[in-house]
């Protein structure tokens, strides 16, 4: 029973840890499917975490924090669009700018407003999101298997966890079953053909970026107003890049990207478990090396043990209408 | 919109001086706004920056010390960028490069000092390049995006170095995560010591002989990129990969060469930091210099002639910035990270924001003069 409970708690943390990755991967999917590279997920996640925490603190409600985080991320996405879609600047440079700007600005403002350490004040339970116990979870607790799966793994998560996994089928439906999704994919594959068909390439890319901003805001709010009760310096810790790697590994498909995100989440959950544990044959692995596992895994996955990733055809290229 | 400007009529100083300066000015305006939001007076901040970086000789020496670091990391980013590669991994390559400097210096300390310096420099280059090799190889052979892999290698380098500093090469007599100090005779001569030779009495500053190495590295990069076949091939791949392939140039080979040189240059940061300043490996010594290199290279338009003044400008920002953080409680060094982001935005991603207007303004004026 003990090992079963262990597995349950490992899966439970996997779902929780994967949540920001899932949001970020879905956000990246919209941008990249429309032909706009988005390395800026990291910076936007950080911005959302900061704004959500500050908003929740000042207005006393995590929902207002979330709303402000969405505003912030959509603005940053629009900035990315302004630089790389309208002014045809280099997309990667624009993303790097957003990331470095956000690493600096969030910590600098946190320090200026709340003191030197670059933390925002700890949120009270009214100011943050709390774990949700699903109906009947307590009643089913002691039922074998069902209790384990339902009460210990599925129930008791923050609201973002449920939204994240619900968003995947919705994203799939939008991207592959609606005319908006068809246009989105076409803009990323062959913008000039789409232009010929009378669809505005620029406005499609801006729309995609807007959805991108909304989705990534959830990832940041999850970090600072649900899992943690404040913002701290560089709290996104590379998750934006991991999510992008998951997206590429998942070949820009929601379902496969989700699996990749869960794999990252699982490795991370395992990594936390392994710290300080004596392993048979190997002994205790130094904690610094264990912490590097998700990053090493990212490189290994990107190296493509499942074949080369084929990106949307027009990705990274600004569209020039006159051609 | 009047976007059609005859590029051949635009004078070089408009394209390469006026436009970048306007972009820089915009970036500084936005940065001033941030300082205002943080609750401090931007004009006072500018005054402090100028005093801190120019106001006294040690301050100026500090400015040049930071410049040294930014020249290395700026050149590193630029070399890869000429091959259209975004080497965001300067931070990790510099970290590992520092390991190379230290290991070589401590193991060969019995050799004559200049020989050790040369070998340590080679160590910096080899270790930095080696850390760039795997992302380079994966980009060339597997198409794994170098931005993600180099970022991951930054995280991995940081974990690896902390592990080494805690468990393997730490000075076990001390508490902190750092190695033992190198023998004193191996330390690079500092500006203070050189000044004393000329009878000038000044206080300590970290500026040392590596500044001259940075100048040499700038000449090397200029020569490499514009005067050698390697440089030509790298630029060809970066400019138009398909055309390069038709011309018989291998993109794979050049991607790897560009990344190795880039990593080697980033690794040279270790010479300044380990041989010149700390004389041991301290956890986290690259302190963001690798990332700043991106802003430096973009501002300097990836040319050594531009990178050097850009590095100097960031030296002013860093040294003046520490003066600001000292005097203004609301400003931390992260504010200057944000400033870097703004500079990358305006001189990189938004570099064409006002370019058409500015260029057509000058072209029109020249046309009028010709008519008259």
Image: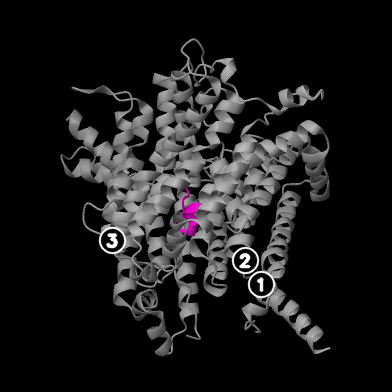
Q: Is residue B164 magenta?
A: no
> Could you give the CA–CA distance between mark 1 and mark 3, rounded to whole angstroms?
36 Å
Q: Quadrant of residue B346?
A: bottom right
Q: Chain of mark 1?
A: B
* Residue labelled with disc 2: B351
Residue under the point 56% across and 53% down: B222
Q: Residue B247 in the image: x percent, y percent?
A: 36, 69
The answer to whether any part of residue A231 appears in the image is no
Front residue of this view, candidates A106 and B289: B289
Name the residue furthest top: B173
Residue under the point 69% across and 42% down: B315
Asked which secondary structure carries label 2, the reply is loop
Q: Are marks 1 and 3 on the same chain?
A: no
Q: Residue A214 in the image: x percent, y percent?
A: 48, 63
For residue A101, which numbered disc appears in the image?
none
Q: Residue A310 in the image: x percent, y percent?
A: 29, 65
Number of residues whose C-alpha sits closer than 10 Å to that of mark 1, classed few (under 14), some (14–19) or many (20 or more):
many
Q: Chain of mark 3?
A: A
Residue under the point 32% across and 51% down: B138
Q: Chain of mark 2?
A: B
* Residue labelled with disc 3: A309
Q: Residue B339 in the image: x percent, y percent?
A: 66, 50
* Residue labelled with disc 1: B355
Q: Main secondary structure of the magenta part?
A: loop
């Amino acid at each position: 029973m003990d090992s079963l409970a262990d597995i349950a708690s490992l899966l439970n943390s996997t779902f929780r840890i994967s949540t920001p990755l899932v949001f970020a991967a879905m956000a990246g999917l919209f941008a990249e499917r429309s032909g706009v590279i988005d390395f800026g997920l990291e910076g936007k996640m950080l911005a959302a975490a900061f704004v959500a925490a500050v908003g929740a603190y000042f207005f006393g409600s995590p929902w207002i924090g979330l709303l402000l985080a969405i505003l912030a991320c959509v603005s940053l996405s629009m900035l990315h669009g302004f630089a790389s879609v309208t002014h045809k600047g280099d997309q990667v440079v624009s993303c790097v700018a957003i990331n470095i700007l956000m690493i600096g600005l969030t910590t600098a403002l946190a320090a200026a407003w709340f003191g030197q350490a670059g933390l925002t004040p700890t949120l009270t339970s009214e100011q943050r999101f709390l774990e949700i116990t699903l109906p009947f979870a307590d009643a089913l607790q002691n039922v074998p298997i069902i209790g384990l799966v339902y009460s210990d793994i599925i129930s008791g998560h923050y609201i973002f966890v449920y939204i994240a996994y619900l968003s995947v089928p919705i994203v799939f439906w939008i991207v592959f079953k609606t005319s908006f999704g068809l246009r989105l994919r076409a803009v990323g594959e062959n913008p000039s053909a789409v232009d010929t068909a009378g669809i505005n390439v620029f406005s499609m890319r801006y729309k995609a970026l807007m959805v991108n901003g909304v989705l990534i805001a959830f990832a940041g709010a999850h970090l600072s107003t649900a899992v943690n009760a404040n913002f701290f310096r560089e709290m996104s810790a590379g998750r934006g890049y991991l999510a992008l790697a998951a997206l590429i590994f998942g070949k820009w498909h929601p379902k496969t990207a989700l699996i990749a995100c869960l794999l990252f989440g699982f490795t991370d959950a395992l990594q936390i478990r392994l710290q300080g544990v004596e392993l048979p044959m190997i002994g205790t692995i130094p904690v610094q090396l264990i912490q590097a596992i998700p990053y090493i895994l990212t490189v290994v996955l990107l190296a493509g043990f499942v074949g080369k990733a084929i990106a949307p055809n027009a990705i990274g290229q600004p569209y020039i209408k006159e051609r | 919109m009047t976007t059609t400007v005859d590029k051949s009529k635009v004078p070089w100083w408009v394209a390469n001086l006026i436009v970048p300066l306007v972009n820089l000015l915009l970036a500084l305006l936005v940065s001033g706004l941030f300082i205002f939001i943080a609750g401090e007076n931007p004009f006072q901040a500018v005054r402090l920056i100028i005093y801190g970086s120019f106001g006294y000789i040690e301050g100026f020496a500090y400015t040049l010390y930071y410049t040294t670091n930014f020249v290395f990391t700026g050149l590193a980013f630029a070399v890869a960028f000429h091959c259209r590669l975004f080497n965001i991994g300067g931070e990790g390559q510099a970290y590992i490069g520092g390991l190379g400097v230290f290991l070589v210096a401590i193991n060969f300390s019995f050799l004559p000092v200049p020989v050790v310096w040369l070998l340590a420099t080679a160590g910096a280059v080899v270790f930095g390049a080696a850390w760039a090799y795997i992302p380079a190889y994966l980009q060339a052979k597997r198409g794994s995006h170098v931005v993600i892999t180099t970022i991951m290698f930054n995280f991995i380098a940081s974990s690896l170095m902390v592990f080494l500093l805690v468990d393997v090469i730490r000075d076990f007599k001390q508490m902190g995560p750092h190695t033992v100090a190198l023998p004193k005779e191996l330390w690079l001569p500092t500006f203070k010591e050189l000044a004393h030779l000329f009878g000038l009495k000044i206080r300590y500053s970290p500026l040392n002989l590596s500044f001259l190495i940075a100048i040499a590295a700038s000449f090397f990069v200029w020569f490499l990129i514009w005067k050698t076949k390697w440089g030509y091939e790298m630029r060809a791949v970066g400019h138009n990969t398909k055309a390069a392939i038709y011309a018989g140039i291998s993109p794979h080979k050049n991607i790897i060469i560009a990344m190795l040189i880039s990593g080697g240059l980033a690794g040279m940061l270790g010479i300044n930091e380990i041989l010149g300043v700390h004389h041991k490996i301290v956890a986290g010594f690259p302190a963001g210099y690798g990332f700043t290199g991106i802003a430096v290279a973009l501002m300097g338009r990836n040319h050594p002639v531009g990178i050097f003044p850009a590095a100097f400008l960031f030296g002013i920002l860093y040294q003046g910035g520490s003066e600001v953080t000292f005097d203004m409680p609301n400003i931390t060094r992260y504010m200057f990270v944000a400033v870097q982001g703004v500079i990358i935005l305006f001189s990189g991603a938004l570099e064409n924001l006002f370019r058409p207007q500015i260029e057509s303004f000058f072209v029109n004026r020249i046309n009028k003069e010709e008519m008259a």
